[in-house]
Image: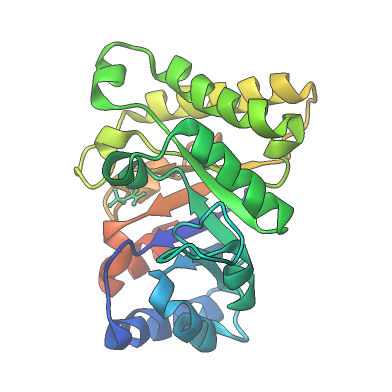
Amino acid sequence: MKNKIITANWKSNGDTNSLHNLLIPIIDFIKKKESMLKLIVVPPFVYLNQVHNIIINTNIMLGAQNVDIHSNGAFTGEISVDMLKDVHVCYVIIGHSERKIYHKESDLLISKKIQIVQNAKLIPIFCIGETEQDYKNGITNQICQKQIDSVFNVIGEKAFNNMIIAYEPVWAIGSGRTPSIDFIQDTCGHITDYILNIQNVKKKSFFIQYGGSVNESNIEKLSKVIEIDGFLIGSASLFISRFLKILTKY
Ligand code: PEP
């Protein structure tokens, strides 16, 4: 049976009211729909505990949008992996392009964050993908390989065991544009083959999501791509009617 893992990345959006408005209909939907769908909700840090209290006793999982590489201590403004565990987080998005653009996160820092998360037995959602210029230059595979190599160099081949890799073309995030289905299929196939080759194994021990302007109009087409195990969804996960349409059509 095909894996179906959806990550809803709320980014820096929402307030106490919107948590309920979004989550209650989703919980109702999931209860009614007998499905293999696994949903990871990723709210801003300050709402993690409240979201946990709403989704407790459901099979919705909790994710965080970032983590610091340091453990608890004198790191004003940072959130440690121990704190994330303390509030029942299971997944952490690492290397999102918005963190690279606005916070200048490097491949090395991202690799170290993945290591910290894995050492704490949490699951990283490792975002990789090319810029528009890279895409136009036809070097998407090389860019993804470089991002994967960085993690391999820091952690080794075991890094990719039990990890979600989100292929997110930077130019597709929040833009309303997506690559063609063939392109997504080829790129995700290449990412899988490249990691299997690094690990020197035949069987995949990681999951691949596609992210970048997934919405209620393109989900059916995108879900036909067998190389992907699910989707990382930003904007469309913030509107309950749109998000429920996506869940219904997936
Ligand atoms: C994202 O935040 O990773 C994302 C894919 O956003 P959007 O769905 O809005 O493109």
32 relative to 43 in the view: left or right: right
Judging depth in this view, the residue of 1 and 240 nearest the camera is: 240
Can you see residue 168? Answer: yes
Residue drawn where x is 29% and y is 27% of the image: 131
In the image, is 48 to the left or to the right of 245?
right
Residue 157: % across, % down: 74, 29
Q: Quadrant of residue 246?
A: bottom left
Residue 83: x percent and y percent?
A: 58, 72
193 above or below 94? above
Q: Is residue 119 left or right of residue 104?
A: right
Q: Nearer the viewer, residue 56 or 106?
A: 106
Front position in the image: 68 or 170: 68
Residue depicted at x 59% and y 66%: 72
How is the model colour-coded? rainbow
Which residue corresponds to the image point at 80% horizontal and 25% vertical from the top-left? 201
Task: Quadrant for residue 106, please give it.
Answer: top left
Q: Which residue lies most toward the front here? A: 74
Q: Is residue 5 above or below residue 203?
A: below
Q: Is residue 196 above or below residue 125?
A: above
